[in-house]
């Protein structure tokens, strides 16, 4: 080579070279399977907990938690093996001039497209399954788009966390062993679905589920929904007898006959409103910023860790 | 109640101290038998590492030692926090349990190693688990327990004398002056390679010969600038280290494994490699022509649309080589390109490499079956472990002269002569390192 001094392709050009590789792998290495898988998971969740989503407070809390879980699951599975399965190849290519930042950037673009597709599929499946979508929106004319943005940010955040795991795990087995631990942390520390001690609450800021769930509740105007759990629990006492009579049954009948049930449900809800779930754009924006911030942290950490790939044992 | 608790605590502490002392006393005996300095027996952490050396389980010993460091640290922090923060102590207890379980597992691994070294039955492991101090004392002081091998002490070993001076750079070829390549390995400085000096003219195909751990890969990585050594590497007039970012495109390194994505086609794999490695000034037409020429040279034209996974072993190897050859490098290095290939296919591959060398390139090849293709090589580099287990240059020169130098008639016999005795060799590495250095001193002056 006489002209080896001349310039070689920079970071942007390399990003597109690797993006091409990733799309070919999408077809040939069966990476496309994550798309039908997301449809199946969305269908199962919509069937199990979709009925009361955005209809009651309890249904919304459970439903948004489940939706966040779908996103986390999809994101984790998209990229948990992406880097570790070709670690030795990346090491060889790094030696030959590959920029790690370009390699990670190509993954970011590819995974973003994959996450968008998964969110679209999830929302389509939920619509077909009759899951209620909030009527009012905060940012765009369509509330489904607002919800879609939140679902995308949760999925993408989880995706980048899995990419980070994949960038330091030496083998796919290691990565797949770490994944359930992260999944448990994400679910346990969502900050809403499970009652945590006050000391543990700061830890919830670390999870995408907390910010995703909060944003989804706020977008669904959680505080305007009725609360049914107290009514349902009270109904179980309808046959309790006091001195040979059933006073509770009579009271329930009276409430029903006078159409006061919904009023009671709303009264019950008013006592349990959560200011963190208010229908307020600033709350949703805050959640989105947290999700984007964590995504960036994971990406930067992945790039830094991969820069040390040459130190891998031979 | 408090008085009872305090006395129980002291009782527990005395028991722990007594156990520690008994184990240390036992270790003194074992260390003496295994050739390890006895003073380490009383030093916490260090004694754990030394016993792993006695058990011939150095790798496990490193982890065992690190686990002990963390156990001591966490225990100390827990003691400090006692009475201040119950939550913090409980929180620290979680990793401590995990570490303790890991420590037990590694302790079993090391004790099994010790049982093997002392040629005893595996059921002794139960004695180590349930009566550790007593068992270690018995093994340390009973004359019936003798290790089958001792720990190699390299601190007294003398390094063979080498050339110890740089060679002048040649204008048309590769000049290697590796003074030393060291690493910090588990808090100790370790010399992997020392005093390797040579001049390889262009057009030469060179065999790199050496036993396991002789520093072949270290040498190649130092040569290419991938892992820099205390060295000067000149390719023609260019300094490989100083101009590494540019020079790496002029050096092709083909790894032993065929590291390519199996789900991509041959043509696209090569095309991406070309995009990554060829200069941007090269036109699309020139690049396409280069890709076609390389596909043709390595006999891959017929399978260019096939997925890499569908290729035969020989074709995959040729593609792996083609990825590096796409830039037409002046220095071409191959790590066991014939691994997994049968004799005929391997021969054809080496003939291709000979052709590349004949075009004025330097081709350096590691192979474990050199004799079947030795007629294709011009020179041979022989690396050997000296008495200090450092990789040294035992010979560099023509293949013909190497037979005379070592007094052998095949490369495999040469390898046998330089290998250590415990590896089944003749253990003459130091002799040849010094002999070669003397001959070079006469030549260089």
Image: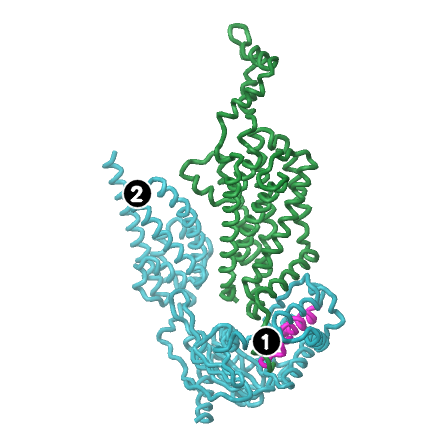
Chain colours: A green, B cyan
Q: Is residue B240 left or right of residue A75?
A: left
User: What secondary structure is marked by label 1?
Assistant: strand
State whether residue B48 is above or below residue B284.
above
Residue for point 61% across, 56% down: A109
Which is more toward the observer, B150 or B411?
A: B411
Q: Residues within 10 Å of mark 2 (few under 14, many from 20)?
A: few
Disc number lying in front (1 or 2): 1
Q: Quadrant of residue B289?
A: bottom right
Residue holding disc 1: B252
State whether residue B145 is above or below residue A185.
below
Spot occupied by residue B150 in the image (x, y as percentages of width and height): 40, 68
Residue for point 33% across, 55% down: B23
Spot occupied by residue B41 in the image (x, y as percentages of width and height): 32, 60
User: What secondary structure is marked by label 2?
Assistant: loop
Do discs 1 and 2 belong to a common subunit? yes
Q: Which residues are magenta?
A: B312-338
State whether residue B232 is above or below residue B75.
below
Residue B323 drawn in magenta = yes
Chain at numbered mark 2: B
Instruction: Give the mark, 1 or 2, whose residue is nearer the N terminus.
Output: 2
Q: Quadrant of the C terminus of chain B?
A: bottom left
Residue most extreme to the top = A244
Residue A238 drawn in magenta = no
Which is more toward the observer, A255 or B269?
A: A255
Residue holding disc 2: B82
Chain at numbered mark 1: B
Determine if residue A185 is in view: no
Residue for point 55% across, 26% down: A227
CA separation in Å, label 1 and label 2: 60 Å
Which is more toward the observer, A284 or B426?
A: A284
Q: Quadrant of residue A142?
A: top right
């Amino acid at each position: 080579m006489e002209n080896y001094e001349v310039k070689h392709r920079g970071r942007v050009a390399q990003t597109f070279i690797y993006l091409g590789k990733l799309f070919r792998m999408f077809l040939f290495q069966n990476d496309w399977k994550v798309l039908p898988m997301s449809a199946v998971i969305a269908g199962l969740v919509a069937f199990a907990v979709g009925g009361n989503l955005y209809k009651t407070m309890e249904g919304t809390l459970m439903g948004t938690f489940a939706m966040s879980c779908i996103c986390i699951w999809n994101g984790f599975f998209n990229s948990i093996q992406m880097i570790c399965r070709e670690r030795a190849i990346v090491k060889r290519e790094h030696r030959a001039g590959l920029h790690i930042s370009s390699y990670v950037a190509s993954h970011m673009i590819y995974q973003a497209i994959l996450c968008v597709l998964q969110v679209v599929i999830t929302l389509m499946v939920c619509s077909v399954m009759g899951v209620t979508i909030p009527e009012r929106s905060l940012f765009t004319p369509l509330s489904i788009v607002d919800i879609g943005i939140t679902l995308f940010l949760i999925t993408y955040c989880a995706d980048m966390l899995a990419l980070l795991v994949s960038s330091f795990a030496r083998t796919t087995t290691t990565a797949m062993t770490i994944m359930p631990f992260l999944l448990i942390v994400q679910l346990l520390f969502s900050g809403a679905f499970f009652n945590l001690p006050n000391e543990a609450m700061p830890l919830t800021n670390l999870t995408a589920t907390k910010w995703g769930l909060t944003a989804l509740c706020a977008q669904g105007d959680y505080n305007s929904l009725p609360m049914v759990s107290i009514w349902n629990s009270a109904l179980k006492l309808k046959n309790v007898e006091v001195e040979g009579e059933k006073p509770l049954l009579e009271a329930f009948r009276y409430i029903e006959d006078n159409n006061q049930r919904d009023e009671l449900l709303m009264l019950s809800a008013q006592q349990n409103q959560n200011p963190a779930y208010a229908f307020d754009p600033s709350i949703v924006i805050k959640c989105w910023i947290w999700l984007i911030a964590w995504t960036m942290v994971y990406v930067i950490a992945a790039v830094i860790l991969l820069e040390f790939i040459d130190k891998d044992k031979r | 109640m408090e008085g009872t608790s305090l006395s129980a605590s002291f009782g527990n502490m005395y028991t722990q101290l007594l156990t520690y002392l008994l184990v240390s006393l036992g270790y003194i005996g074992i260390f003496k038998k295994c050739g390890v300095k006895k003073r380490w027996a009383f030093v916490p952490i260090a004694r754990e590492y030394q016993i792993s050396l006695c058990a011939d389980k150095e790798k496990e010993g490193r982890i065992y030692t690190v686990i002990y460091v963390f156990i001591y640290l966490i225990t100390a922090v827990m003691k400090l926090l006692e009475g201040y923060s119950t939550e913090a102590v409980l929180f620290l207890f979680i990793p401590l349990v995990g570490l303790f379980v890991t420590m037990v597992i590694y302790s079993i691994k090391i004790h099994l190693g010790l049982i093997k070294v002392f040629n005893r039955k595996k059921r002794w492991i139960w004695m180590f688990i349930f009566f550790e101090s007593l068992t270690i004392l018995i093994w340390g002081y009973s004359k019936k327990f003798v290790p089958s091998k001792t720990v190699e002490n390299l601190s007294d070993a003398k390094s063979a004398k080498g050339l110890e001076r740089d060679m002048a750079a040649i204008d048309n070829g590769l000049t290697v002056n590796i003074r030393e390549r060291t690493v910090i390995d588990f808090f100790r400085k370790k010399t992997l390679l020392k005093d390797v000096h040579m001049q390889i003219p262009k057009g030469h195909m060179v065999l790199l010969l050496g036993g396991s751990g002789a520093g072949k890969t270290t040498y190649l990585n130092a040569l290419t600038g991938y892992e820099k050594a205390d060295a000067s590497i000149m390719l023609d007039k260019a300094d490989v280290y100083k101009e590494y970012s540019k020079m790496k495109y002029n050096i092709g390194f083909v790894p032993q494994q065929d590291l390519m994505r199996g789900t991509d086609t041959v043509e696209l794999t090569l095309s991406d490699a070309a995009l990554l490695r060829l200069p941007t000034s090269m036109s699309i037409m020139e690049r396409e022509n280069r890709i076609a020429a390389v596909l043709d040279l390595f006999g891959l034209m017929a399978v260019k649309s096939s997925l890499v996974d569908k290729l035969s072993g020989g074709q995959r190897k040729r593609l792996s080589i083609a990825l590096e050859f796409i830039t037409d490098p002046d220095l071409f290095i191959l790590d066991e390109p014939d691994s997994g290939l049968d004799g005929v296919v391997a021969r054809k591959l080496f003939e291709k490499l000979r052709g590349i060398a004949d075009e004025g390139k330097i081709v350096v090849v590691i192979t474990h079956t050199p004799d079947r293709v030795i007629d294709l090589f011009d020179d041979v580099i022989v690396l050997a472990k000296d008495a200090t287990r450092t990789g040294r240059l035992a010979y560099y020169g023509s293949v013909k002269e190497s037979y005379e130098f070592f007094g052998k008639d095949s490369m495999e016999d040469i390898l046998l002569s330089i290998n250590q005795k415990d590896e089944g060799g003749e253990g003459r590495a130091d002799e040849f390192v010094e002999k070669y250095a003397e001959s070079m001193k006469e030549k260089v002056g």
